Amino acid sequence: DDIQTEWLNNKQSIGITAGASAPEILVQEVTQRLAALGAKVLPDDQGIVENVSFVLPKALRQVDIKTETNAAPANK
């Protein structure tokens, strides 16, 4: 409901972008709301599919190791 109908008056096209951290459900809700207001929603353009992974910084990896080392043993 945050999208106001008046924003769409006299508009021929609307572009939507979302960063990698944007929850997919939020993007879907925006496109569904625009469609409900009468907008023609085009297929999602995924662009270039990238399979990139990043290693945690050393300081964070060390915190994980210390946490696991000092953790109490699980009761079995």
Image (tube, rainbow, N blue to C red):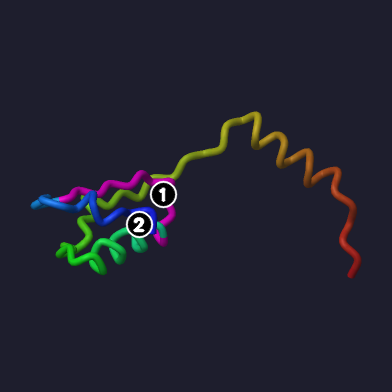
Image x and y of residue 36, in percent? 26, 69
Quadrant that contains the C terminus: bottom right
**Left or right of residue 67: residue 5:** left
Quadrant hosting residue 42? bottom left
Quadrant that contains the N terminus: bottom left
Q: Which residues are magenta?
A: 14-25
| Residue at image coords 65%, 34% | 60
Kindly state the secondary structure of the residue where label 2 is placed. helix
Q: Amino acid at mark 1?
A: Ala
For the residue pair 40 and 70, the one nearer the viewer reads as 40
Closer to the N terminus: mark 1 or mark 2?
1
Quadrant hosting residue 58? top right
Image x and y of residue 13, in percent? 12, 51
Kindly state the secondary structure of the residue where label 1 is placed. loop
Q: Is residue 75 above or below residue 5?
A: below
**Label 2: few (<14), some (14–19) or many (≥20) C-alpha neighbours in 10 Å:** some
On residue 22, the disc is 1
Q: Amino acid at mark 2?
A: Val
Asked if residue 59 is among those painted magenta in the image, a careful observer would answer no
Q: Is residue 64 above or below residue 39?
A: above
For the residue pair 53 and 12, the one nearer the viewer reads as 12
| Residue at image coords 43%, 54% | 23
Q: Are marks 1 and 2 in contact (CB under 8 Å)?
A: yes
C-alpha distance separating marks 1 and 2 = 7 Å
For the residue pair 9 and 64, the one nearer the viewer reads as 9
Residue under label 2, please give it. 27
